[in-house]
Amino acid sequence: MLTLVVAIGVFGQVVLYSAAGGSLYPWAWGQGVRFFVLLVAALGVSRVPVSVWRGAALPAYAAITLALVAVEVLGKVSGGSQRWLDLGVIRLQPSEFMKPAIVLACAKFYDMLPTSETRRFGAVWPAAALIGVPAALVMLQPDLGTALMICAGGVTVMFLAGIPLRLFVGGALGAAVMIPLAVNFLLHDYQRNRVLIFLDPESDPLGTGYHISQSKIAIG
C-alpha cells in the first residue's frame, strides 16, 4: 500500500514538473514538500491502535454531521458555495472531515453486526442512512464532488463487509436510470457542465474543458 501511495505521488510530481516546462517551480517543489510532510503524518496516524479508531468512529461521525448542519445555519459563503465554518483563527470545511469519518462509521456498524446478518436487508439500510445524511447535507452546500466521494467511501465499506453483489447491481441499475433525471433537473448549471465536459472535454477546449485538455497535454 505504501508503495502504491508513493508511486501515485511521484507520478503527480512528474506531471507538475512537465506542466511547468521541465522546472520544479512553481508547482512541483511545493507539492513535493506537502506530499512528504503529509506522508510522514499518515505513517504516524497508521500507528494509532485500531481500538482508538473503533471507539472514535461514531462520535466523530456525529460531531462532523452536526458541523455540517451548522454550515447550513452559520456557514460562510465563498465563491457561491456555503461550505466553511469561520472560527476566527481558522476556517474549517467539515465535509472534508466526513470523507474518512464515513468510512470509520460504516466500518464500525458492520463491526457491531453479526456476520450472519450481512446478507439481509437490515445490513443495508442503516449504512445507507449513515451515508445519505451527510451526503445530502453536502449536496445542499452545493458540493457534488465531495458528496460523491462520501458515497463512494461508504459504499466501498459495504462491499468489503460482504453485502451481496446483487444489491450493488440493483443499486447501479437504479442509479443509471436516475442519472439523466438528476443531470437535467437536480444539478446546478455548473455541475451539469462539469458532467458534460467530463464526457466530452473537446466540446469546449478553451473554456470549461481547458484544464482537462491541458492535463492530457502535460501527461503527453
Image (cartoon, grey):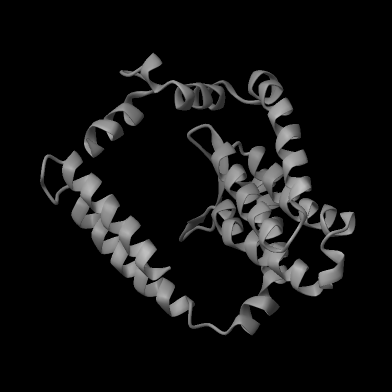
Residue that appears at 54% across and 52% down: 93
> Image point 78% across, 47% down: which residue?
167
Q: Residue at x 33, y 19 (%)?
A: 205
Q: Nearer the viewer, residue 117 or 80?
A: 117
Quadrant location of the N terminus?
bottom left
Q: Residue at left 62%, top 44%?
A: 147
Can the viewer see residue 60? Answer: yes
Q: Is residue 203 above or below residue 8?
A: above
Of the pair 176 and 130, the residue shown nearer to us:
176
Quadrant position of residue 113: bottom right
Q: From this view, report whether residue 72 is shown above or below residue 29.
A: above
Please state which of residues 116 and 72 is positioned toward the viewer in this rendering: 116
- Where the C terminus falls, by quadrant? top left
Q: Is residue 128 left or right of residue 194?
A: right
User: What is the x, y in percent for residue 6?
Assistant: 32, 64
- x, y (%) of residue 169? 73, 41
| Res 35 quadrant in image | bottom left
The x and y percentages for residue 24 are 14, 51
